[in-house]
Amino acid sequence: MKLDDLETPAALVDVGRMRANLRRAAEYCRAHGLAWRPHAKTHKTPELAAEQMRLGATGVTVATPREAEVMASTVDDILLAYPPFGASKIERLMRLPEYVRLTVGLDSAEALDALAAAARRAGRSVGVLVELDAGMGRVGLGSPEHAVELARRAAQTEGVEYRGIMFYPGHIRGPVAEQDAALATLNARLAERIGALEAAGLRPEVVSGGSTPTFWRSHEIAGLTEVRPGTNIFNDRTTAEIGACHWDECAYSVLATVVSTAVEGQAVVDAGSKALAKEELRAEGGGYGALLDRPDVPVRAVSEEHGLLDLTNTGWRPRVGDRVRIVPNHVCVSVNLQERLWGVSGDEVEAEWEIVGRGRSAWAGRAQVAAG
Amino acid sequence: MKLDDLETPAALVDVGRMRANLRRAAEYCRAHGLAWRPHAKTHKTPELAAEQMRLGATGVTVATPREAEVMASTVDDILLAYPPFGASKIERLMRLPEYVRLTVGLDSAEALDALAAAARRAGRSVGVLVELDAGMGRVGLGSPEHAVELARRAAQTEGVEYRGIMFYPGHIRGPVAEQDAALATLNARLAERIGALEAAGLRPEVVSGGSTPTFWRSHEIAGLTEVRPGTNIFNDRTTAEIGACHWDECAYSVLATVVSTAVEGQAVVDAGSKALAKEELRAEGGGYGALLDRPDVPVRAVSEEHGLLDLTNTGWRPRVGDRVRIVPNHVCVSVNLQERLWGVSGDEVEAEWEIVGRGRSAWAGRAQVAAG
């Protein structure tokens, strides 16, 4: 099948670029002795998790029970980096296949106790990582004392096994000097907490961190054993704008058709906020995406099914019916709006992957892909 | 089933409020002699389209072939308010059941000619509305001359039937005085275009407009015959903030669970940008939603699966495990992130509606709901 045969909007993955992105990440982790546990929330697709496992991932990270169920078809080591609160969610985790080594990150006694009770009832042991606030102020315990307290509770509670700590340095991005300062603060913070845990006899076997913006600096985080990047399988406009990848490392784009040129200075395509998402760029520059082959043409505005290409900085004048490929600001939320990904090489469509991990309902499928 | 039995995040529709919203809209249209053709993009759900038809809608509006296919299970009069460019999309429209009276809005000769050619091949007649730019600058023809030219082409082309004009006044919102001025400009613009069409013997039988922000002022738009509001079946935080509905007319909310209170001054819930969407509020006030029962508690920030409730202006301090209902900024994009809607009355879950019109792929289902 050819690219021209696809109905738009369609989500494309440049297979060559994706493999190169994954190989680079795998090699970096090998070189620095870090376990590579990519976050599957970005692709939600078992075939792509299988690719990550083949290239050396030790397992995957997930955020929802649905993602855990789907990834368990392919991967036998899963970290749920999200506290599973509520009986129904916890029971779904307990029903994961027995071969799955499950670890859960959490930051409260409530979440810990509910998980442990369910694990005892189910007769399985679940690993626990105590989540720390790395400075982002989203979730995670702030003080060393609270971290020690919850780690001790995990170590002493039947049904769960204390495995270490996790954090998400999502606040670290931007200019190198700012990153330097933020990494120094993070290292001091981590050292204090790891020290407190060691003093309490609770040395963390796992210290799990990492994000796409800080990915290539993960080796500078003292004590880190594992990284969980999601975005860098595909990259996106934000990742490129903040300098964490090159533009030609963007592997994901939304194929769209020009549907109107009636208004001067712009062209309207059939990909709007229901295909690209309407997330502001977390970097310099405005708009909601840019053309893969013409990064000087941004998507200036989006409605639900309309994307407005800004032709101010280009002499290019598309016609109704022309097709373009758009790199969105944030790939994870754009993928979540699609039903499937099309793997492409040049003009050839090589693969069709259903994004099975989307949504919330329990997954009734079975193992479809050989475990990595 | 009770509300407490639902796993979170879950999309709730207060059935009583929704019915009251629909009845008010239907009565307004009856009182002013306007055809009511609600936009199904907001709910994408045949059962809710059936409810609109029962209350007096003349048909529905859709934006995608998928929505058209799904709505054709229930509704026999459909306006596709979007130019269907590309052979595959047009062929899907031609395969709609024969009982569907189909009209398409478009603004280019390219879109018109492709549609007409397909209609001739399929042996059906498709209505055409010429789309005008009402001042929003998104799509639609700008000058009276261009409108006459495309209307004439539609009237003279076999396979299509010229039915009139359409426009979307999405730029009109905000303070009453601003709306007054914008409506006066719109009326002058419309009068000029309708006059030019009449002079050319192309009097528009249909003049289709209307949006949720301007809904209650539709009768002030001279010559209007039809309105296409989407949002006001549910309303949302933006609609309330701009004064187009009262807060207690918000019928849609996302049920979420508090999963972390580790960071001072906030509570984190399990509904983030993959349940609420991360769209800025197009009105005063920040954040990405607010609690239905505590509108002074906004969702200050969202990550993909985290929503951060800002507790600055409240003495209320939720605990891990507590549940809240969040009204998102923009309901259409939040619904599009869900698999199903739960119809609720108080604490009772009365109905489960699958959002069948989501996505892009061809719909293989059949008529499930009695036509309105």
Image (spheres, coloured by chain):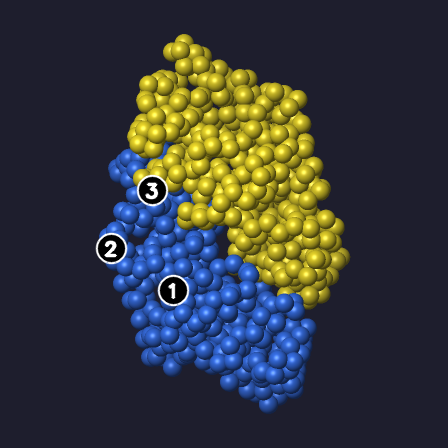
Chain colours: A yellow, B blue
The chain identifier of the residue carrying mark 1 reads: B
Q: Nearer the viewer, mark 2 or mark 1?
A: 2
Choose between A244 and A57: the one closer to the eye: A57
The chain identifier of the residue carrying mark 2 reads: B
Q: Which residue has dot 3 on it?
A: A88
As drawn, B138 above or below A344: below
**Residue A272 appears in the figure:** yes
Percent position (x, y) of residue A39? Answer: 53, 36
As drawn, A77 above or below B347: above
In the figure, is residue B266 to the left or right of A167?
left
Q: Which residue has dot 1 on it?
A: B232
Total marks placed: 3
Disc number for residue B204: none
In the figure, is residue B34 to the left or right of B78?
left
Q: Amino acid at mark 1?
A: Asn
Q: Secondary structure at mark 1?
A: helix
Q: Quadrant of the C terminus of chain B?
A: bottom left
Which quadrant holds residue B17?
bottom left
Percent position (x, y) of residue A269? Answer: 62, 60
Marks 2 and 1 close (CB-CB < 8 Å)? no
Q: Which residue has dot 2 on it?
A: B348
Q: Nearer the viewer, mark 3 or mark 1?
A: 3
Q: Amino acid at mark 2?
A: Glu
Q: Secondary structure at mark 3?
A: helix
Residue at the (32%, 63%) spot, across then down:
B18
- Gap in angstroms between the C-alphas marked 3 and 1: 33 Å
The chain identifier of the residue carrying mark 3 reads: A
